[in-house]
Each structure stands twice: as structure tokens, then as C-alpha cells.
Amino acid sequence: MIKKILIANRGEIAVRIIRACREMGIETVAVYSEADKEALHTKLADEAVCIGPAPSKDSYLSMDRIISATIVTGADAIHPGFGFLSENSKFAKLCEDCGIIFIGPDSDVIARLGNKQEARNTMINAGVPVIPGSTEAIYDAKVGAKIAEEIGYPVIVKAALGGGGKGMRVANAPEEFENAFQTAQKETQMAFGDDTMYIEHFVEEPRHIEFQILADKYGNVVHLGERDCSIQRNHQKMIEESPSIALSDELREKMGQKAVMAAKAAGYENAGTIEFLLEKNGNFYFMEMNTRIQVEHPVTEWVTGIDLIKEQIKIADGRKLGFEQKDIHLNGHAIECRINAENPQKGFMPSPGTIKDMYLPGGKGIRIDSAIYSGYTIPPYYDSMVAKLIVWAKNRKEAIRKMQSALGEIIIEGIDTNVDYQYEILHHPDYLEGNIDIGFIENM
């Protein structure tokens, strides 16, 4: 049995994992950079190890240092959280080679699904609907232009390796293609050290719908319903909710079945997310699979009552799922707002600094996942998200009202945040009516 877990991450997700481990009677090891010496996760874990300077490449992305910390502290397993090394197949393979349990799928699966083109081909073979697009890697703009003509405009050029909205450009007409391709390719070279591209038909005004799945080592796979992640800026999610107002029971069942098919086709184990684009006519297409826990996992936990972090650990420990698909029922409605240290009035410019004072809301149906506290200095080196505010209520209307109230109570002095911007979205007529798609922010 797993007795000690090293958390190869920081911030609120590290705190979240530590709390789950405490409840399971599992010891924890925190790792931290020099910039995170006073971070909350270092104080809550049973042990804490400094793994290097502030830059991520010298600390949270340093595989050798994290593996060394695991061995020195005698940890049985590593939980990668999200971001950093969570979807790095080389890191997962290194864990396997060192006899360390990686809490996630095995390295081969991560490698196959991490390459968007290979993941796409896997889904096609499994009968999961995919967006019309190229089937082979593309490196040249002229070759890409010919394929774009065959697919039909508008098209989107995407990095085969990558994520977070980087290496993506839309071309609405042939004359826009070359510039879109070259710009996306340069961006992916800078961000991921790779120039492999592929091309898809661009689905206009879709919703971003993702299905949470859990799969054990014995072939048991279930989905835990969907999350609507359509409120996003520059392909970065901002507000997520479950269930989606756009899905009928029939469509939910159909999409859920395809999500399970996708996971089985990939030979998947542990927690994962199948992401779809949903058109207004009800057609949906596989977009990608995330081989890790998602930032927005709390909304699924609210509506299903299932602790996803604990399930990840149990699966990694070789245990069977304790439930079947027929046991999964969505109850009520949950919404999550990502609270970032940034200034929307200044182009969402990051706002690191010291928190002078703060008040976070509470009460029935309100959850805060965060690692900040009064006097804490937010470093400038990492992602700007400082907290997640999640609410639950009997239905969407009540959940929105609860979120409006909770956002109105938040006080974080000393830095700029996007709280007021989130409050504005939660009062927007189209959001209230559920008339949203992935272009909502741009069209506000």
C-alpha cells in the first residue's frame, strides 16, 4: 500500500492533495523552489524539500531533483497535480524505471495521448467523432495550404505537442493561411521545442464540454458527467460548471458513452478528461484527452460526491473502482471561478505581490481551494491563479446567485485580481440565460 506521497507541484493543487492524503492516513512530502519557501503547501506537508531556484526549469520541471527528493524521503509515489510534469511521458517513464508509483496513466499512454495527432487517430479507429482534419504531421505551410483547401475553411492550425492555447491560429480564408501557419509554428517552437503542426476544420461558436472519467487497472471505466468550460480567454478556462445547460439527458448519455469508449481505446488508467467541442446542432467532436487531474475537478466532486484525488490514489494503489456507471448520479449544480492575480483593466497583466489582508467567503455550498494567506507574497514566476471559488446549489439559477454573493464578499488587498471581472460575467444576461460559447469573453 502507498504510505508516503511526494507532491511534485505547488499552490492550491498541492494543498488539495495534501489534505486528501491526510484523510487517507498517507504521509506527504512537499517540494518547493527557493521562491516558495513560505508557501502554504510546505507548511502543511509532513516533510518539505527544496529542489532549486525559482525558475520552473530549475525546480518544478527538474525531473532529476524531484526523483532524488522522492528517493531521499522514502516516498512510495509521486502525485504530479496539473501542469509542470503532470503530462510528461519522460517523467512518468523515469518514475517507472525507478520503481516509484506515478499517480496517473503509464508513460506509453501519456505519450500517445499527448501527441494530438496520434490521439486523434486513436479516436477515429475507436469510432469516436473527431473534427475533420489532417491525418499526418505537417511541417510546411505550402503543404498545409493544400490540405486546408481539402478540409474547407475556416481552419485552425494547431501544435501537435502542447497546450494552454499556445501554437494555435485560425485562418478564415486561403490568403490568411500562410501567416497563420508560420505564426503558430514559431510559437510552438518557442514554447515546446517542436515544429510539428496539424490542421482541423474550425468549428464556429462551439461549447467546450469535457467528460471526467475514472479507469482502474482491471478494465473498469466510468464517466462522472460533464463540465461546461466555455467561458475562457485565449483558450484558458475561467469559469466552469456542471452539469451543462446545453445537454439533454439523451445527449449526455451519448457523449458519456463516447468518452468511455475513448478511454478504453487508449488503454487508459486513473483519472482523465475527454474534451469535446459541441455545436449548436448537437454534433460533437473529440478535441483532446488530458491525462491528469483538471483544475476544475471540484465541480464534478460537488455534483457526484466522489473525491477525485482519493480515487486517483486508490487506482494507483491497485484497487478496483468501488462503483459502476449505474451508481453515478448528478445532483444539483456547481460553478467554479478561477481567481487570478491579474488586472483585467490592463490587459490581464499579472499582479504578483504581498497580500496585505484578505477575507474569503464561506457557508453552506461554498468551497475555496487556495494556498494564499495574509502576509503571503505571490511570486512572479508561476501561473497567476491564486484561488478557486466553487459553489453548489440545487439548480443553476441558485448556484449563480450563490456565486454572485460569494464573489461580492471576497477581499484580497495588496494585489489586483479578476474578482470584479468574474462578478461582471456572472451578471451578464447571456450567461444568466446559458447562451454561451467559447467566444463569449471576446464578444462581451
Image (tube, rainbow, N blue to C red):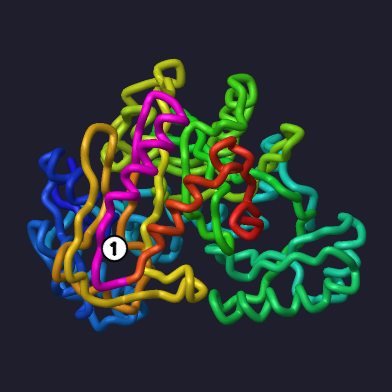
Q: Is residue 392 magenta?
A: yes
- The quadrant where residue 435 appears: top right
Q: Is residue 74 magenta?
A: no
Task: Looking at this view, name the residue that lies furthest to the top.
Answer: 326
Give the image location of residue 268, x and y in percent.
Answer: 48, 41
Give the image location of residue 61, x and y in percent.
Answer: 35, 73
Give the image location of residue 306, x and y in percent.
Answer: 32, 31
Q: Is residue 231 left or right of residue 293?
A: right
Task: Looking at this view, name the residue that lies furthest to the left.
Answer: 46
- The quadrant where residue 150 appears: bottom right
Q: Residue at x 27, y 62 (%)?
A: 11
Q: Is residue 337 above or below residue 350?
A: above
**Nearer to the camera, 17 or 281:** 281
Quarter of the picture containing the C terminus is: bottom right
Q: Give the amino acid type for the residue marked by disc 1 in the picture.
A: Asn
Residue 93 in sight from this viewpoint: no
**Nearer to the camera, 370 or 314:** 370
Residue range corresponding to the magenta coloring: 391-415
Q: Residue at x 56, y 42 (%)?
A: 431
Identify residue for label 1.
9
Q: Residue at x 45, y 58 (%)?
A: 421
